[in-house]
Structures are given as C-alpha cells and as structure tokens.
Image (cartoon, rainbow, N blue to C red):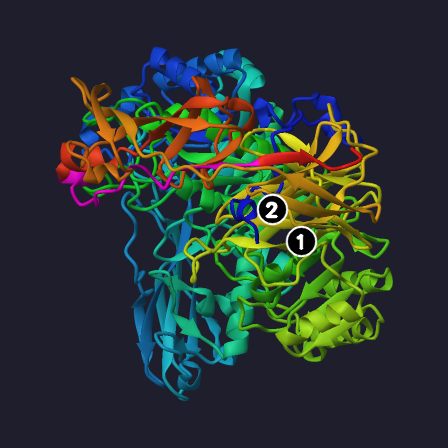
Amino acid sequence: MNDLTRRGFLYLSTTTATLALSGTPAAAGQGRTWFSRPARSVRPMVRWWWPDAHVDPAELRREVDQLAAAGFGGAEIAAVHHSIRDKSVLDPAGHGWGTPAWNAAVEAALDQAARRGIRIDLTIGPAWPAAVPSITPDSPAAVKELAHGSVTVAAGATYTGDAPPPAVPPGEGVTERKLLLVQAARIEPAHSTGDETGLDPASVREVPVSGETVSWTAPGDGEWVLISYWERGSGQRPESGPHTAPEAYVVDHFSAAGTQAVIDFWEARLLTPALRRLLRRAGGALFEDSIEIETDALPWTPGLLEEFGRRRGHPLAPLLPVVLLAEEDPVFAYDAALTRHARKDYWDTISELFNEHHFGRLRDWAHSLGLKLRAQPYGLRTDAIAAAAVLDVPEGESLGFKNLDDYRCLAGGRDLAGGEVLSSEAGAYAGGAYTTTWAKVLTTMGGAYAAGLNQTVLHGFSYASAPGAAWPGFAAFTPYDGTAGYAESWGPRQPTWQHMPDISGYFGRVHQVLREGVPRIDVAVLRQTGYTKTGIGASWFTGEGIPTGWTHQFVSGPLLALPAARVSGGRLAPSGPSYKALFVEGDKFYAGEPTMTLPVAERLLEYARAGLPIVLLGAWESASVPGVPGDGENERLHERVAALLAEPTVRMVAGQADVPGALAALGVRPDVRYATSSTLLTLRRVAGKVDYYYLCNGRHVENPKPPVAPIDHDVTLARADRDGVPYLLDPWTGRAERIALYTEEPEGIRLRVTLRPGQARIVAIGRPGLSGDRTGRLPHATATDADRALYAGAHLAVRAARAGTYTTTLSTGRTVTTVVGDVPEPVEPSSWRLKVEDWRPGATPTRTTKVVHELELDALVPWTELPGLADVSGIGTYTTTVDLDGPAYLELGEVTDTCRVRVNGRRLAAVDQLHPVVDLGPHVRRGPNTIEIEVATPLGNRLRVADPDVYGGLGRQPYGLKGPVRLVPYSEARLPGF
C-alpha cells in the first residue's frame, strides 16, 4: 500500500467538476448544482425546543435566520423543558402549549421560515406521547389500561364479596373504573414460570357478577384463582409537564376516539386562519415522538374484546389471564406454546388498531392540511415495519436504536410502500451535554445512511432562554437530574457552530444522493413480528452477510399485500428495492418458532412460482400459524408449506452456515462484493441508468468491539448500464470527478476503497457526461505502481510523492511508463502562532464574553497542556509559514473538534472532519505560504469550571490541534500519448 493510498486519497484529485450526470432524471431536473449545493428540501433539520410559549417572536425570527444561515432545511417545534426542575416558574395557563401565546409564536416562526425558504414541522402535542388538555383521565378518548385483581380460593371453598380490587392502584386523577368481567381458573403448577402463576386453560370460566359483587364456589379439584378485570384510564400525562392548564392527558392511541380528540383540539384551538395559511407555505409535517405508552397494567382500549374476536376469529376472554400485565410483567401462564400464541394474538390486534385508528387517521388529516405525517412508530410491541408503510415519513433514533437493523426495519416498510424519506432523531447521547463532538455524531450517523436513512433531525437546537436558565442559555435536556444531561444543544452558543455550514452541507449532499431514484437491496427478510428498536438482526445476514457485501431489509406480513409487493423477472418489488431473494426464519420474538399465517404462505407460494428465490431457515415442514390456531388451520398451512418447499426456487436449510450455499445454488449474488470480511457498509440506489453507491467504513452498533479500523481493499460494484464509468462524489466539498483507476468485470466495476473509521464516499456509475468532463473517449488505468492515476483535464496522469519511473496499464491493454522528477521531502512545521478566542459566561445567561489569548508554539499539544488554556473552550487559529516548491497534501492529524483551513488568506473547501487531509495543489505558490487552521471546540471544558454544580463531574478534554501536522509534496506527470 503506497503513501497516498494510506491517506484515503485514492480517488481525490485537484481536477473537479460540478455534477450533472446524464441519464439521471432527478439530477437533470435540478440543474448542475444539485449535488454541490443541495436543495433546502434535503438539508438536515433540528429539533427546536421551546420552553412552551415563554418565547419572544423577534427572537424566534432570529433563530430561524440562524438556522437558515447555517445551512439547515427545517426545524421541528417541540414544547420540551426537562431541564427546568422548578415548574412553578412556568405559566401553563398564559404561556402553555396551545394557548394564544403559543399560536402567535408558531405563526411568527412559520412566517420567518417561509421568508427564508425552510420548513417547520409541528409536534402533535406537548412533549410526548400525544396528549391534549381537552380530556380528563376518565374521558372515553383518554389512554386506557386493563387492571386486574385476584384472590386464591381453595378447593370447594366459597368466595363472597366485592370483586377483587385492582392489584395496581390507579394513576393520579383517575376516578372511574368499569368491571369488565370476572373469571375463575384452576392453578396448574406445571405451567408456572418464574413470577408467572401457572393456570389450566381448560378450566377458565366466567363467573357471574351482580354489580361489583361476586359469590362463587370453587370446584373440588385443586386450588383456584378468581380474577377480576377493570377497565380504567391510566392517567398518563406528557413528559415533564405541566405544559397546559388544565393539564393535558395522553390520548387512547388504539381508538378512533383518542385520535379524534387530537384532531378536534387542533381544529378548535390551534389552527387559526393565519396558521392554516402559513402551514401551506412553510409547513412540512406533523410529528409524533416514540409511542411511550406507560402503564402499570395492560394497555387497553374500549371494545377490544369485540375487535379481537372479529380480527382473530376466536374470543379474547379465555386468553385474558396470560396477556395481563402488572408493573409491566406478565402475571399468569398456560403451557408455553399457548401462552406465546395468546400474547402474539393480543399484540397483533393492538398493532392493527394502532396503525389504523391512530397513524392512518392522523395521516389523512395531516394531508387535508397540506402536511405530511412523520412519526417514530415504536415503543410498544406493535408492527413498526407495517407502520412505516402507513406513515409519510417514518423516523428512528440514534439513541434508542441498538443496531442498524432497527433502521432496516423501517426502511423496508418505507420502500415497499413507495415512500421516499426515512428520518432519524440524530445525535442524542446520555450525559453528553456540551461535550459531544461532531466526529462522534458523524461516526454515529455514517452507518445509519447505509441502512436507508436519508433525513437527519439533529437533537437539537434550544430556544435561547427560559426562566431560571444559566449560561449558555436554556437547554431542554441539561441540567438533567442536576447533572450534565442529554446532548446536544447546538446553536450559536457553541463554538463549533461557526463551522456548521460545512457539516450541514455534508448531510445535505448525502441526503440528496440517498433520495435519488430507488433503492436496490439484495434480500428481503420476512419478520413475522415487526418490532424495531430491539437490536435483533437477521440470522447470517447481520453477522456474516453484511461484512461480505450483502444488503438486506426487513418486511412484515402486512407489507406483502401492498401493490408493490409483486414479483417480476425473479425480483420482489421490481419497481422499488427489487429484492433478489426472500429469507424466512423463525419468529425471533416468540421462541424462534417457524410460524406463518395462511395468507403469507399463499403469497410466498405465488412468489416462488413467479420465480423469486426463497430461503427458509429452520424446520418449516412442521410450521404453525402464529397466535392461537383455528380448526384445521395448521394442517392447511402444512399443505401450503409443502407445496412451497417443492418449488425449484425454494431452499430450506437447517443452520445459518448453510444460508450462503443456498443463495449460491439459487443464483443469488450481492450487488457489492469484496474478498475480505470488512466493516464497509453500502447502499445502492438507481436512477435511470445511473447507479449511486454510498460507501461508509461504519459501525453496526454504537460501540463495536473491537473498534472499527481503517479499511483498504478492492470492491466490485454492479452497474445498471454496461457502458457506465465510475465517478467519485465528495460529500464534504460537493466536487465530482471521474475515477481513473478501475477494472471492468462481468459483475461490474472493481475499484479500491480506502476509508478511515466513519468516513464516507459516494460513487456514481453512469455514462460519460459529467459537466466539464472531457474524458469520455479516454481509456482508464487498470493498474499502476504510482500513488494514483487520475484524469487531469483531457489527459490521463499519475501522481507520486517520490521521484521515479512508474508503470501504468491501460484499459486498452497498453502498458506505459512515466517519469516523475524530484519531489521534496515531507515538511512538519516547527513553529506556530496560536490565537485563542476563549468563550466565557457573560453578563446574562445568553451572553458570551470572549477573551483572546495569543501564544507562540514550538510544538502542537492539547490546550490542557498550555498555560492559561486548561479549562478553555472556544476557537483557536493556528498560523504557520512554510516554503513549498509545488503542490502538497496538508495532513492535520488529530483535531478536536471541527476545523477549517485557509491558505494565503483564502478559505478552502470544507475539510473531511473524520479524515482531515487537504489537497493544497491549486492553492499554494512557490516560496513562502501562510497556512491557517481554525479549530472550534465543545463548551465542556469551560462549563466544568463555570458551572461546577452541574458540569463539575465532566472530565477535562484535550481540545485543539494536536497533529502531527505534515505537508506532503507530490508531483504529477502526464502519461505518454495523452
């Protein structure tokens, strides 16, 4: 491996162009700058946290301007103030969510957003979950729970008295309850598991009730339990209230009544004529956070007994004992299989009600306002994959998602429904307030883009001030329980905000490419239970498939009924992700059972007969239907599975190790291939005849062991157009160039990929047609012993950091030699001038005083080792002068946190913050050159001494430019004949 390759500059050159690939309908429609200057619609957003309506419209307009100037495309307004522990300083009656003051503030924000061309999303209620102040805990529309009471009755004994009262006391404000029924069941110790009392399912019977009084005599065969079921409100309120007066209560998410309560409140109290007009101009979406329905009993909704029977085909009542929850734990159990099946049926019913009555109704209403519905469809045991197909914009989160498969679940729902955007609540870290670096955020999000994410909503941007807030201003989640809270509160209060346009430009370019055309995914993984936020992946594909180039998404049963879920040409959903195969394994959330509904089995049989390769892992010849089976249902399933296994496009394997062999036997290969196991993560999208590959040296989980290491290996990329040639798109600079060194193979284009941990690049493959690109008829290099080959204008050239004679093989088969003359040795500057702008608390919580320190350095060390800078946060400018005889690379080494570079007074394009190496070729002159490196830090080091009661526990961080900084000269020579 040569020296320049080690720097990750295999494809970068000084000859760049503005991207306008031919054959790309979206790109052509957006003009030549679609990549270099991405549209506002694809730029990142922020969570904009307000302390309810304790905001000033003039300040809101300033903050919209700040976001627009920093390169953001939108903001989501949320009433959140967890950091304010003394809620008495708030005024929910006059300045709460939904008050006239709130409406006026929202109108001001929307108006300014319309002026600046950014969009505003509105949360569906204050904080989360969805709640309104127009209901009480006892209202029909309020969130409900099913509480139980029980008493043990000896054989032959008689119980007379009130029905057993609920074991779990009611929530605050709950005054009503309804006795649904009373049952008796014989205790069966053989079915007991841990804290679950075993019951005999055949013994369950309903007990007559008079009012709330029971008189019942137990049979003489064993010990019995009498169980009462009480329907009541849970009394749940939105997080960290009160936000309203009267207080808001969470709505029933499983009934039309609960959702209608939200709609009615908005229509009556929030949607003023002015707001309606402004939403049409600057509104983007209504948003609902994760569905954190918190109850100490069983989540419930009125009419669930009837809905369950209608949807499942058998009654819920005989199964109620084993679906009960108390303090979030099950109470009773039948035999293991029946218990699993009963609970599966219950949650499937809840899932259907949730997606239909809540997300479906909210989405349709949002559309009537000219808005979309964005939501995080998880938090309960519901089918989030199916919910992602209902939503306009499904959203995940970097904090709660345990690995990239959690995103792949939502991506499967989005793509089979024909959606475009998968969003993420990005960059939240517990205890990371004012210490989070952009390197951490970028590394976290890098892998998520390969899993299908293409919208980033940063967590977050706090309104400037709030009652009782200390410097540097109000932050929604810090202090949190008296100490450093959740990251991060971005904005002008942060020194790194000076470099925010570089970061937002990077996000925007990645989003832009990842919304082009349609995705191409190798394999669909059928998940019988569509949960996400679990970290549970797919057998073989997650552990072994991804490291060797395979891509996959998850789909659940309801998605197979969508119009796009058809097979043509041996591909599932050919107009969308175009899966090459379907993989089915046992239900990982229910003991790994090979389960499948009859409609899904029939759909799979249809797919197999249409030519779709299907691989089943496990003993599927003995499969059962999920839930409690009806008469003959399992037998009918066995017939369909037997027919499925008889199809030539189907393979059943016993173990994970057999999966790749089955795929190979069916002729299924991944779009991306490489010979070595790698941490490379990829995503392919196709627009017309142009392929876009997002490549990231990423991590599948937040803290991998061992940590991600640099990668340097060949990769083969499939191409839609056999005449397509590769281009490199740099998401940091917005530049594009044709790649000069690659090999054409029957499977596609083989080229070298060299990436540092977290670093990403984008490769486009299309016919020559890059604006300003005159390389169309030129051959390319297939091998060279120079540091790299590149196109220099209309010529093919090589570049090297050492003098010598270099040999290059061309795609024509010709081999040529090139002489590179003397190249100076690398230079490491020996002296620096450092000017530090030290950010300190000002006269008010929102003012910052900046004190300047100037030092002369003969070595680069962290600020913690420099006199007077140990506890400093701010912006440092390092200046040095270096004599150069020609072009060179500038290697910055280690930097904390963000950086920019100026050469001879000219600011250069954005620096890759994860691999800060800059090509100075077109910017240097012979002789002395002045180099300035501007470094911005987090605020943590200053806050640990400025506010020690809250931040004193933070460790002192080594801020600044630590290097080593080197200038590595190179020389470039044209190949003979060009």
Q: Is residue 741 visible?
A: yes
Pick the front one: 258 or 908: 908
Q: Nearer the viewer, residue 825 or 620?
A: 825
Is residue 594 placed above or below 301 in the rendered structure? below
The C terminus: image quadrant: top right
Among the 4 quarters of the image, the one containing residue 970: top right
Q: Where is mark 2, residue-wise?
A: 695
Left or right: 448 in relation to 647: left
Q: Is residue 590 above or below residue 510?
A: below
Residue under the image location 21 percent in, 32 percent down: 872
Q: Which residues are magenta?
A: 949-970
Asked if residue 951 is among those painted magenta in the image, a careful observer would answer: yes
Above or below, 783 against 867 in this view is: below
Kind of residue at badge 1: Val
Secondary element type, mark 2? strand
**Which residue is the extreme one toward the bottom?**
221
Residues marked 2 and 1 touching at CB (< 8 Å): yes
* Residue picked out by circle 1: 715
Q: Nearer the viewer, residue 664 or 163?
A: 664
